[in-house]
Image (cartoon, rainbow, N blue to C red):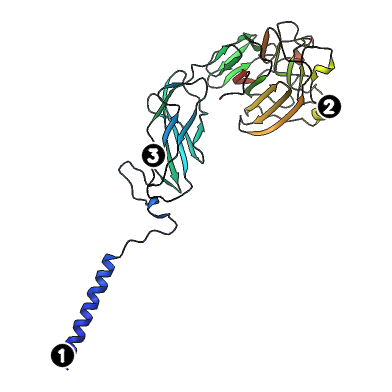
Amino acid sequence: MFRSRVTVSAAAALLAIAVACSRQEASPVTPSGAPGAATDAATAADGSTLKVTAPTPLSPVNDQAQNGAPTLTASGSTAKFGTQMPLQYRFQVLNESGAIVQDSGVISALTFNVTSTLEFKKRHTWRVRAEYQGQFGPWSASGSFISSEGGYLRANEVFDPLYNGVTVGEVIGQVTFLSGQGARLDSTLSYVRYLIPQTITSGEFSMEIMGLRANAPGDKSKVFGMQEGTTDYITNPYRVDIQYRGTAGFPPNAITYRVLYGSETDESVRYEPTTEQRLSSVVALNPNVWYFWKYTWGTQVRVTVQEGGPTGRVIYDITRNSRNGTYNPRPHYAFIGTPTGRSGSESASIPGTIYRNVYIGARPRPF
């Protein structure tokens, strides 16, 4: 009996030891929902929590000079343990002092268009990292670029930021430069004109505008335009006339346009929306909102307006075929606002409008 009890006690002790050992040797359980070791939340020495490689900056790098707002491009990250996951990325742009001037937020792309206002002709650096479900990988090495020198007017291309307090064009009438915003036309007689060295027979004329308001005074009020030389604007054979009509217009608050390809009287080279299109293009613009206006010309003429900027909601888009004639003004002038023609000040510039980031060129807007 005594031997039997000893045997049972020994067996129980051995079992207890085995269970204890098994508990100590069990592998840690990967938390549910995490794709294995690649998202182990342990913080690395560089502060990252996502087990991926750092992206690599591709462009711009090595202090590459920029003509406009830069587009940042990088190669992607890969998981260190081979786990596939839908990575997203965060870009940051830093100024000469190392302060962050723009953070992209989390985006699902390896390119990012910088939209913040950068100091002109200054060295900036940028970096990018991968992110996934709140965790983040290591920052890339820094890319670098020299920001745009500001505006330029050369050959068949113009860029005029205007928010830097100067213009590459010629100011006519009373124009106020608002720091960080743009150039404000203060009267119906105010405009900025650009003499383009090489005539642009097909291209783009675009800008951001704020201050346009519904039910404003005026008739066929002009937002921007182009012409040949400096003769009367309304009778010019190469008139481009982009309008936002005032309360005396038909109808009020309509966006519309008229384009002439070489003749004021020949209707076969006159391009404009139909009456029905004009009547359906009444838009109550908000004076506190930036709108991106774009006119393109060639074998078609087209005007688009986007609310909030170049990536905003399209609120106007009318295209007309323009196969007769060629837009060929010599010399070629372009305007924000327009000169006062024979129609008088009711059909001229719109006071209070603020313009910035004006682009005119033979190629699509590059930035």
Residue 341 pos. (x, y %):
76, 9
Q: Residues within 10 Å of mark 3 (few under 14, many from 20)?
A: many
Picture quarter with the N terminus: bottom left
Q: Is residue 143 left or right of residue 15?
A: right
Q: Nearer the viewer, mark 3 or mark 2?
A: 3
Residue 13 pos. (x, y %):
21, 79
User: Given the current orientation, which residue lies at the most extreme left position?
Assistant: 2
Residue 345 position (above or below residue 24): above
Residue 86 pos. (x, y %):
49, 47
Q: Which residue occupies 66% across, 30% down?
A: 306
Instruction: Give the residue pinned by disc 1.
Output: 3
Q: Which quadrant of the structure image shows residue 325? A: top right
Q: Which residue occupies 40% across, 55% down?
A: 36
Q: Secondary structure at mark 1?
A: helix
Residue 283 position (above or below residue 165): below
Q: Secondary structure at mark 2?
A: helix
Upstream in sequence: badge 3 or badge 2 = 3
Q: Residues within 10 Å of mark 2 (few under 14, many from 20)?
A: few
Q: Is residue 277 left or right of residue 74?
A: right
Residue 159 pos. (x, y %):
57, 17
Q: Which residue occupies 64% across, 27% down?
A: 292
Instruction: Give the residue pinned by disc 2.
Output: 275
- Confirm whether residue 253 shows in the render: no
Asked whether 22 or 363 is in front, the reply is: 363
